[in-house]
Image: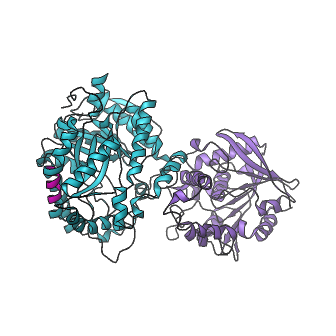
Amino acid sequence: MTAALPSGSTQEAPVRFFSFHLMPYPDLPPDYDGPAWITCPNELFDPRLGGDLYNRYIDELVYAEELGFDGVCVNEHHQNAYGIMPSPNLIASILARLTSRVRIAVVGNALPLYDPPTRVAEEFAMIDCISGGRLIAGMVVGGGPEYYSFSLNPAHARERFAEAHDLILKVWTEPGPFEFTGKHYKLRYVNSWPRPIQQPHPEIWIPGVGSLETLEFVAKHHYAYMGIPYFHINVFERMFAMMRDACQKEGYDADPLQLGWLVPIFVAETDAEARRRYEEHFWYFVRRLLPGINISPPGYTSVRSVENIMKNAGTFALNLETWDEVVEGQYAIVGSPETVTELLSANIERLGVGNLLGLFQLGTLPAADTKQSLELFATEVMPKLRHSFPGALDPGASVGARAEDRS
Amino acid sequence: MTTLARHTLDSAVGEIEVHRAGSGGPAPVVYLHSAQGEGPGMVLLEQLAETRVVVAPLFPGFGSSEGLEHIDDIEDAAFHVLDVLDRLDLPWCDMVGLSLGGWMAAELAVRWPERVRRMVLVNPVGLYLRDAPITEIFGRAPSELAGELFADDDFPIAQLMRAMDGMEADPSQIPFELVRPILQSQAATAKLGWSPYLHDPKLPSRLRRVTAPTLIVHARKDGIVPRVHGEAYASAIPDAKLVDLDDAAHLAPLERPDEVAKLVLGHLGD
């Protein structure tokens, strides 16, 4: 499953195309002006609508396989309207069954929220088995709001993450049973059934917003770094440059497959039509679903990383006011197939990324618009980008396999 | 008034900052600060130092005090304070603690009652009372907190906190040197009080072990800790009484140093 790409220089950068779903709640009442996170009253969640949404959103992800995408992505958030997917593993296991070819990226499980985190090793291994070895295992510290929602001490977030990561990798790569005694987790019998199909372990992705610790961690382990959106394009450029530096410090050149760019995309027949149909849904996302996402609990980020993150905070999408700003900062790539192709092509080059994670459904964007945009992207945009970035023709490519190939 | 001098002390967790002045009195007064990290330049301490030895250590994560990475919870904090007392050569002392510092003083006094001669707890956190929660302090806008921490809107720190409003939208506008100490002290407070929220479930049943005559001060305009917390401390500690302070809020020792000094000296004796 993880056949290496044909050997070639990094200049002919491969690109893999993923369809990412946040599974947003599109029906917050107009008179609710509070945050979408932590304390957003759950009376506002209509379970019948919720059921429809889950099924619709799963359909949208499954459709991406039919359209020729290389993979699909889901992620984990709790107690919020921004993304009603507290368990991405449930959705990923459904996708594992309903698809047969695409990589299934869970981006990721918030490791410190699982106690013991062997649960993550088990569930990821299950998804990998059910999917025939198509899982991409994302691991994340978890967003600031989760530390309120779980009453989990944010000052322990980083060390819990590191310890949970070490434990999960050990579960996958060393024979059990064994004893694990860390600071936060003390387990006498670690012996996960099942084990993942992909050996030594599934490809690992780490999403981030530019914290130095995370970049260094990803570089050290040769994992892939997924830049989380909603910042000005310049911020991504700096972030990926930092990632390349971090890899250099570890003594190697970053593989483009180690870099991923998550960006909202909407394609329609013309630029004007695209904006006309998309803009209100984008603003629902920015003004109704983002508020509260950027809360940073005390001790969650190191002082040196906070300094770096603060520099970029002014460009966070929550501060957007006009469509011109959206276009200028490329917070979303919206337009005709030609425009979208041109912008994506330029940015893939500029950022040097090997994974494009398109967010095709956003905010209140209805099913029909999402479907049409996906289709236009798949038929009019993706083929041209594949032509420009030919490495993408092998969907089995993975960071691990390429690293192995080089060594 | 007597100005406190800054010293450093090698503790088990790292070098910490200790402010100290004065002489005389039946026992040195050790002041344990709140989550604000107050101490240096504090009028109350300067007043106490006129007649007493005053020692104010800054907890790891506050000021230049190191070692927060070795502290995980309130029990570690109690052992840290014990270590500081040992290294300061204080076999016993009078303890004054505000809020978080009051909680630390209580945690110390239940474990090593012989180390505390007399004790004053001002608006202490540390207890959980079902229908009287401690107000959320994490993730709140400074302008909102100002009204809960201070009785007087015009008090300089309260004004400063209100001026910080609106800066959250673009934190890059705030000079990082102003932010750094706040981040560190908030991280320290989170380590002790994120969860369980600013309390120790085991503390109530242990308070009977306190031998020091204890004064609990409740500020009537405290927007953080309800009065019943003071009552609970006063009824669980064998020799304790509760007094109310008018026109003062959570950070009463900053806002009303004269009144607090009078209460403290009245309780500790000359």
Question: In screen coordinates, is B239 left or right of B49?
Answer: left
Q: Is residue A288 left or right of residue B104?
A: left
Residue B175 position, x and y percent, is 59, 56
Q: Quadrant of the N terminus of chain B?
A: bottom right
* Residues rendered magenta in the picture: A371-378
Residue A360, image quadrant: bottom left
In this view of the protein, can residue A30 be seen by the observer?
yes
> How many numbered circles are shown?
0
Quadrant location of the C terminus of chain B in the rendered image: bottom right
Instruction: Residue A377: say if magenta.
Output: yes
Residue A313, image x, y percentages: 46, 56
> What's the magenta bit mostly, secondary-structure-wise?
helix
Query: Is residue B217 or residue A276 the one in the foreground?
Result: A276
Which hue belongs to chain A? Answer: cyan
Could you tell me residue A336's position as x and y percent?
A: 20, 58
Q: Is residue B166 left or right of residue A247?
A: right
The single residue placed furthest to the top in the displayed view is A407
Q: Residue at x 81, y 67 (%)?
A: B266
Depicted A372 relative to depicted B242: above or below = above
In magenta stretch: residue B95: no
Q: Position of residue A123 (x, y in %)?
A: 26, 42
Q: Is residue B8 above or below residue A361?
A: above
In the shown orientation, is residue A297 left or right of residue B51?
Answer: left
> Which residue is more in the foreground, B119 or A141?
A141
In depth, the one of B209 and A199 nearer the eye is: A199
Answer yes or no: is residue A200 visible: no
| Residue at (40% x, 36% y) in the render | A244
Given residues B259 and B60, the one toward you in this image is B60
By what rule are the colours in the image chosen?
by chain
Look at chain B in the picture and name its colour.
purple
